[in-house]
Image (cartoon, rainbow, N blue to C red):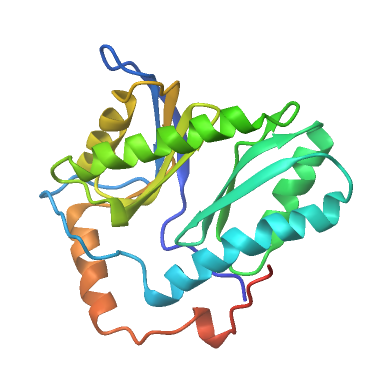
């Protein structure tokens, strides 16, 4: 059974320019504002954490099986069943195939396809992206009211993607912090944004939830 996200994500292309920073695009679930909430505890269930790790390995493998010899470089980042595809594919057709494969993969709630139609980037660009991701994570760790284990940071061709379960204030702070990092071209948040009250309720529910893979299914990692 396909896992359904608690809230459907509504991607909004709201272009914000922070003075002296990279442009920011905010996207996320609609949520009410509320009292600030910050916790170092993962806001996903144990089953969701496990499934996300499995999805990040399985989906690129499934896509590669479908695309065959088509030259491509695809990375899947998953958070609470939401999957972000980044990298490069040669054609619009390959991009559509990748999206469809990801959408029909087990336990995927939503797919955000950010694959670029171009030649694969070289090793130097990938090294630059990896270094930039480390810089952004370091800045987030040093920032008050934002906890890195509530978010994932992905960098592709200088574009920073943020995923997580956060409040509107946490989302804003994280985006602005990432945008101020030298080398960042743009920041795109695909976080699921919840009110502080919703997150507090979620954490209470997780305290009594037994550790399990989604609905008793066995997670399988494809190497």
Query: Residue 217 occupies which quadrant of the picture?
Result: bottom right
Q: Establish if 204 lies above or below 160.
A: below
Q: Which residue is drawn at 55% across and 60% down?
A: 109
Regarding residue 108, the answer to whether it shows in the image is: no
Residue at the far left: name it: 35
Q: Quadrant of residue 161?
A: top left
- Can you give x and y, in whole percent of width and height, for residue 104 in the image? 70, 61
User: Where is residue 154 drawn, in percent x and y?
Assistant: 47, 42
Q: In which quarter of the image is the N terminus?
A: bottom right
Q: Which residue is drawn at 49% across and 81% down?
A: 213
Count of numbered circles on the image? 0
Q: Which residue is drawn at the image coordinates 74% and 26% (left, top)?
A: 118
Of residues 32 and 202, which is closer to you in this image?
A: 202
Where does residue 88 sit, x and y in percent of width and height?
70, 34
Residue at figure coordinates x 48%, y 29% from the top left: 159
The answer to whether residue 63 is left or right of residue 220 is right
- Answer with left or right where residue 78 lies relative to residue 192: right
Residue projecting furthest to the right: 69
Quarter in which the C terminus is drawn: bottom right
Q: Give the x, y percent position of residue 157.
A: 55, 28
Question: In this rendering, is residue 201 above or below 155?
Answer: below
Q: Is residue 194 above or below residue 41?
A: above
Can residue 19 be seen?
yes
The residue closer to the viewer here, 132 or 21, is 132
């Amino acid at each position: 059974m396909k896992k359904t996200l608690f809230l459907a994500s509504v991607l909004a292309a709201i272009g914000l320019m922070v003075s002296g920073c990279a442009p920011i695009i905010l996207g996320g679930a609609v949520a009410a504002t509320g009292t600030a909430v910050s916790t170092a505890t993962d806001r996903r269930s144990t089953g969701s954490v496990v499934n996300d790790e499995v999805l990040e390995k399985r989906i690129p493998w499934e896509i590669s099986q479908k695309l065959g010899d088509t030259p491509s470089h695809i990375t899947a980042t998953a958070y609470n069943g939401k999957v972000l595809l980044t990298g490069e594919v040669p054609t619009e057709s390959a991009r559509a195939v990748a999206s469809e494969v990801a959408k029909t993969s087990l336990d995927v709630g939503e797919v955000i396809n950010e694959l670029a139609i171009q030649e694969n980037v070289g090793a130097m660009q990938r090294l630059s992206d990896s270094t930039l991701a480390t810089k952004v994570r370091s800045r987030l760790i040093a920032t008050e009211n934002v906890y890195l284990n509530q978010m994932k940071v992905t960098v592709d061709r200088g574009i920073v993607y943020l995923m997580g379960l956060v409040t509107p204030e946490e989302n804003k702070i994280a985006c602005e912090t990432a945008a101020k990092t030298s080398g960042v071209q743009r920041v795109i948040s695909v976080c699921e944004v919840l009110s502080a009250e919703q997150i507090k309720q979620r954490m209470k529910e997780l305290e009594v939830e037994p550790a399990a893979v989604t609905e008793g299914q066995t997670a399988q990692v494809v190497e």
